[in-house]
Image (cartoon, grey):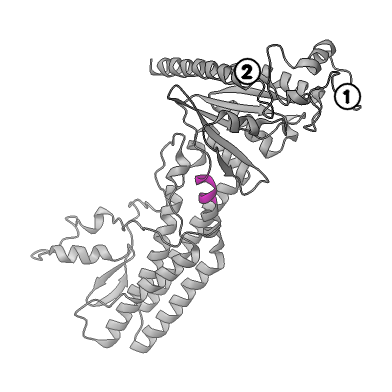
């Protein structure tokens, strides 16, 4: 996946302390001009211009460090589309070096040694800021996972791996702190140079050291870039629009039904860290638009044994207000026995009782006269109900065949009714929340 090559950086935001002097700071009979305030604002927090040289200053302990404690706000669903464009690490460094080398010494310094050390300190400070500011912006702009909608929080955990998102952000912030520390140290050393030659040597040494520190750990920035691309590509669910969620065992024909039910070609959103994707499309009935999504197949096993794809399906059912189109394949073609499908189905019906539901038996053109029974099937506690299920699926299920088009008209009518009911349910829920 090709990384973006540019980034629009936000301008530097300076604390008000740069522009206001307290009574204790003012010198009697000294007039402070606006341009002096501007010059002081251009410098970093740790240095100021004084008598044509660059000296470190001490930050007051009561000042708030906005870089260390960024404000966070709770995000609604759709936070992934608000993520910043992350610049590749090599572009960050290249841009920072170019801008730093263009920095000139403060005008009016006649002494050559003072002018050189002033220029060197300012260039090191500029390089530090040109690297640190984008990293700070990324750390502040990526949402805190605990403030996300539960569905999006599940997407992060199941797609990236539990803890990976936080780890990468923490490492990016750690890299920023190291760059700032090294930059300040070498800018201070350069400002204390006693000759032009010493200032030039310390500038060269400082530039090299900052570049080395960033280069050693710049991979975390590229990891963050990959995370941003992955999350931004996730399908967006509109919580105010009824959603039809197709559920069932693997290979039972869910994706084929998504194509049949959806208008146009559904969007396929690939998950880079898995071997398959998720289908997302829309259904339009009488100008009304509805969402339809395919979910990864479920196998018969306990939750702790499920893979992340199966957990993604459960996350959709747990956190999104969806209507369920449950797909059964009794032909023996999908690889999951009707007995196992029956067990999975019964578990989900009992688990998600609050969802509107319709059952479909797919591939009805392949159904045999006698029910399919696997040699590995074991006696079931609901044996009588299982035998009826093997013949025709759950009570009220619609038999369909994408190949012969059998049952598709009836299915579309049932889906339309189901989604209209889902719309009423969403409206009622919204009204109750407002009250």
Q: Residue at left 28%, top 54%?
A: 15
Query: Toward the viewer: 360 or 88?
Result: 360
Per the rendered image, the range of residues in magenta is 227-233
Q: Residue at left 41%, top 38%?
A: 73
Quarter of the image with the N terminus in it = bottom right
Question: Among all residues in the image, which is located at the extreme left?
Answer: 29
> What residue is pinned by disc 2?
358
The Cα–Cα distance between marks 1 and 2, rounded to whole angstroms, is 26 Å
Query: Toward the viewer: 99 or 82?
Result: 82
Label 1: state its secondary structure. Answer: loop
> What residue is pinned by disc 1?
377
Magenta stretch holds residue 100 = no
Q: Position of residue 262 (x, y in %)?
A: 54, 31
Q: Position of residue 265 (x, y in %)?
A: 54, 38
- Residue 376, placed above or below residue 126: above
Q: Residues within 10 Å of mark 2 (few under 14, many from 20)?
A: some
Q: Is residue 324 visible?
A: yes
């Amino acid at each position: 996946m090709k990384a973006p090559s540019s980034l629009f950086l936000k301008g530097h935001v300076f604390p008000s302390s740069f522009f206001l002097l307290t009574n204790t700071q003012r010198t009697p009979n000294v007039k402070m001009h606006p341009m002096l305030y501007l010059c002081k604002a251009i410098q970093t927090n740790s240095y100021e211009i004084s008598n044509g040289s660059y000296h470190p200053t001490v930050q007051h302990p009561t000042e708030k460090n906005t870089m260390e404690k960024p404000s966070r706000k709770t995000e609604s669903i759709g936070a992934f589309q608000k993520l910043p464009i992350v610049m590749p690490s090599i572009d960050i460094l290249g841009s920072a070096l170019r801008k730093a080398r263009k920095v000139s010494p403060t005008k009016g310094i006649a002494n050559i040694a003072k002018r050189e050390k002033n220029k060197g300190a300012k260039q090191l400070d500029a390089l530090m800021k040109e690297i640190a500011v984008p990293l700070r912006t990324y750390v502040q702009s990526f949402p805190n996972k605990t403030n996300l909608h539960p569905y999006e929080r599940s997407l992060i955990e199941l797609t990236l791996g539990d803890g990976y998102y936080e780890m990468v952000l923490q490492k990016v912030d750690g890299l920023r702190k190291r760059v700032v520390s090294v930059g300040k140290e070498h800018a201070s050393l350069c400002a204390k140079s006693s000759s032009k030659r010493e200032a030039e040597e310390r500038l060269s040494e400082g530039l090299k050291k900052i570049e080395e520190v960033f280069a050693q750990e710049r991979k975390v920035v590229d990891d963050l870039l990959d995370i941003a691309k992955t999350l931004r590509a996730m399908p967006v669910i509109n919580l105010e629009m009824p959603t039809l969620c197709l559920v069932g065992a693997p290979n039972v024909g869910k994706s084929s039904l998504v194509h049949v039910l959806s208008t146009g070609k559904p969007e396929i959103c690939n998950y880079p860290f898995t071997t398959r994707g998720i289908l997302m499309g829309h259904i339009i009935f009488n100008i009304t638009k509805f969402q339809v999504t395919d979910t990864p197949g479920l196998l018969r096993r306990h939750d702790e044994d499920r893979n992340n794809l199966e957990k993604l399906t459960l996350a959709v059912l747990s956190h999104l207000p969806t209507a369920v189109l449950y797909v059964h394949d009794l032909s023996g073609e999908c690889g999951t026995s009707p007995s196992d499908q029956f067990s999975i189905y019964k578990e989900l019906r009992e688990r998600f009782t609050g969802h509107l539901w319709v059952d479909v038996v797919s591939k009805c053109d392949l159904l045999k006269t006698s029910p399919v029974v696997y040699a590995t099937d074991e006696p079931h506690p609901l044996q009588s109900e299982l035998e009826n299920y093997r013949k025709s699926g759950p009570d009220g299920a619609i038999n369909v065949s994408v190949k012969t088009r059998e049952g598709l008209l009836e299915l579309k009518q049932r889906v339309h009714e189901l989604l209209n009911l889902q719309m009423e349910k969403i409206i009622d829920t919204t009204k109750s929340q407002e009250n």
